[in-house]
Image (cartoon, rainbow, N blue to C red):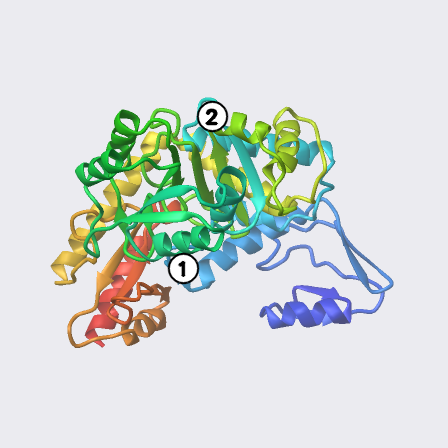
Amino acid sequence: RDFCLSRGLGDVYKRQGINAEYGDSMIRFPQKFPSLYPKYNPGFFLTNGSLALKRFFTMSVTTNANNQAKSHPLLMIPGPIEVAPEVLTMMAQPPLSHMSPQFTSEFQSALNKTKDVFRSKDGQPFILAGSGGLGWDIAIENFLVRGDKILMVNTGYFSDRWVHCMERTGLEVHQLRSELGTFPKPEKLEEALKQSRFKAIAVTHVDTSTAVLVDLESYARVIKANSPESLFFVDGVCSVGGEKFEMSDWNVDFMMTASQKALGAPPGLSLFVISPRLLKQLEQRTSTPSLFLDLKKWLPIMQAYGSGKPAYYCTPAVNNIRALNVALEALCRRGMENVWKRHEDVAKKFRASLQSLDLKLVAPTCSANTLSSIYYPPSLNDGLVDKIGQNGVVVAKGIHPNIVGRYFRVSHMGISVYEDHVERALDAIKAALKS
């Protein structure tokens, strides 16, 4: 048997498939733990039925994280994605005080690395508890007011949702659209900007429903030449960390993403960076009606942690931030240009394999490097996703309302482009097609 535990913990471990004995007041250790713990370490002790964890906690969790990574169904949906064992290990650590020196140092590191990943030379980063959609509300609540005229470059379902957020708050939203699976050409954007003035221009870099990747760099040139006074907002939830993006060089004012996609961390964090222009506007603005969304309240907190000093407004998601810092460190260590190139190479290879299977893309001329949206063969439907799952790989059904039930989505981002995950997903797709 692996070890002897209190009854409650014994039940927990047995549900995880670990052989354990019950003990009411003590714990017995063999000289070696057969699978879960590679070395004997008396770092566990049991007092009055409660288990205390000492120094070998990191070792044990790391081993368990690696075991879990090998045994669970492969997650190939466009977020959340597979997470590196070292990120999982950090996520599983006992919580630290959000005012502790260790967490303060790690939060400072995460903020600085966020700027690096966003390629922001002089922007202000924010990391808040929340999912990607929180960024929409943040941008609207803090930098726009009722009646402002907005141009939305619409490329799919998530552009539609951002429009819905804007219209709920009384903004006047105009939309620039194109056929499903494409994006409006820069020339169309130029025409729209010459016809009218807009307070802000909003773009989804990669729409997760269609896998459309827009030509953001060309858009940036058009906006700078024709409407430099307009604010430039970008939803990068499914792009940051996997697609080329240059926040400062492209004069983006607000860029948002989330932890659970190409950044390679668990869900739970909303990340965004604001430009110096927006920072000045924020400092001059009165507070918003919302307490949590008020960036004037959050700004001194982020600035304090960014300078290595703890501060308090609302409790930060300590474990998520620590795990994010590990994930960001991996990106920065590899170098963003190398990361972008790796995503591009893996995406090209995957799409070539899909073509050999006679599978068609929703966005054949502008597919993202972080995911693919794939039409089912004419005789198949969403049941194919279930069959792929039976082969150990989880992919996502389509969600765009115009083609729902006719396509599925596969991610190729984060750690998956450095492991064999994409090849395993392709094998599962082939097996499902044959069954």
Residue in the picture at 32% in, 39% down: 243
- Left or right: 302 as drawn, with respect to 160: right
Residue bearing mark 2: 277
Q: Which mark is residue 419?
A: none
Q: Quadrant of the N terminus?
A: bottom right
Amino acid type, mark 1: Leu
**Residue 137 in sight:** yes
Task: Please determine whether, in this image, residue 197 is positioned above or below residue 367.
Answer: above
Between 86 and 169, the one lying in front of the other is 169
Q: Quadrant of residue 342?
A: top left
Where's residue 53, x and y in %?
74, 51
Q: How many marks?
A: 2
Amino acid type, mark 2: Arg
Residue bearing mark 1: 75
* Distance (Cα) linking label 1 and label 2: 39 Å
**Residue 235 in sight:** no
**Label 1 or label 2, whichever comes before in sequence order:** 1
Q: Quadrant of the C terminus?
A: bottom left
- Left or right: 271 as drawn, with respect to 204: right
**Crowding at label 1, few (<14), some or many (≥20) Cα neighbours within 10 Å?**
many
Between 217 and 258, the one lying in front of the other is 217
Where's residue 140, x and y in %?
49, 44
Disc 1 secondary structure class:
strand
Task: Please determine whether, in this image, residue 360 is positioned above or below residue 279.
Answer: below
Pair 1/2: label in front: 2
Between 200 and 309, the one lying in front of the other is 200
